[in-house]
Image (cartoon, rainbow, N blue to C red):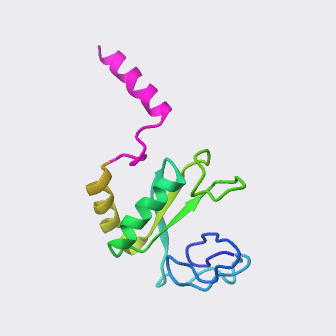
Amino acid sequence: MFCPVCESEYEEGITTCPDDGSELVERLTPENMAQDHSEARFVALHNIGSPAEAEMVNDILTQNGIRSAVQSGGMDAFSPLLSTTAPGAVVLVDERDYDRAMELYNAFFGSDTTPLTGTTLEEDEETEAETEEEE
């Protein structure tokens, strides 16, 4: 099931998008996707290191009145929320809430894209390399 507004995918049995309240559809088509720009139009806020972290960021945003959703690329058999091997996820926000969402994100996490688990191995290696270059 898919949300025609934010284009998020949900498990069978869920009929309404928990993020924006839209009725879910079985398949996204140009005819059923939101075409009216006065409706919510979601834009990327941040690509977060893991789907679980993205969901936690999403929770912070929604608790502060920001219309947001998570788009995850996890293709494993388990829920992407529980997978530590799934690729990162994108936190999407309604473009009308973007500035406020960015303020909230920066107030909580700064520029950290792995706000709960720390840096990735690649980021650690890059930091080490930069430090060695400076010395």
Q: Is residue 122 magenta?
A: yes
- Residue at image position (51%, 57%) is 90
Q: Quadrant of residue 14?
A: bottom right
Q: Quadrant of the N terminus?
A: bottom right
Residue 135 relative to residue 24: left or right: left
Boundaries of the magenta span: 111-135
- The foreground one among 81 and 94 is 81
Q: Residue at x 53, y 55 (%)?
A: 51
Q: From the viewer's perspective, is residue 117 above or below residue 102?
A: above
**What is the x, y in percent for residue 132?**
35, 16
- In the current view of this chain or complex, which residue is farthest to the top? 135
Between residue 96 and residue 120, name the one nearer to us.
Answer: 120
Q: Is residue 78 left or right of residue 134?
A: right
- Pinpoint residue 30: horizontal percent, then vertical percent: 69, 78
| x and y, in percent, of residue 25 in the image | 69, 81
Up-down relation of residue 12 to residue 116 (above or below): below
Judge left or right: residue 77 versus residue 111.
Answer: right
> Image quadrant for the C terminus?
top left
* In the image, farthest residue toward the left: 107
**In the rendered view, would you say 43 is above or below 35?**
above
Q: Is 132 part of what is drawn in magenta? A: yes
Query: Measuring 37% from the left and 23% from the top, which residue is drawn there?
Result: 130
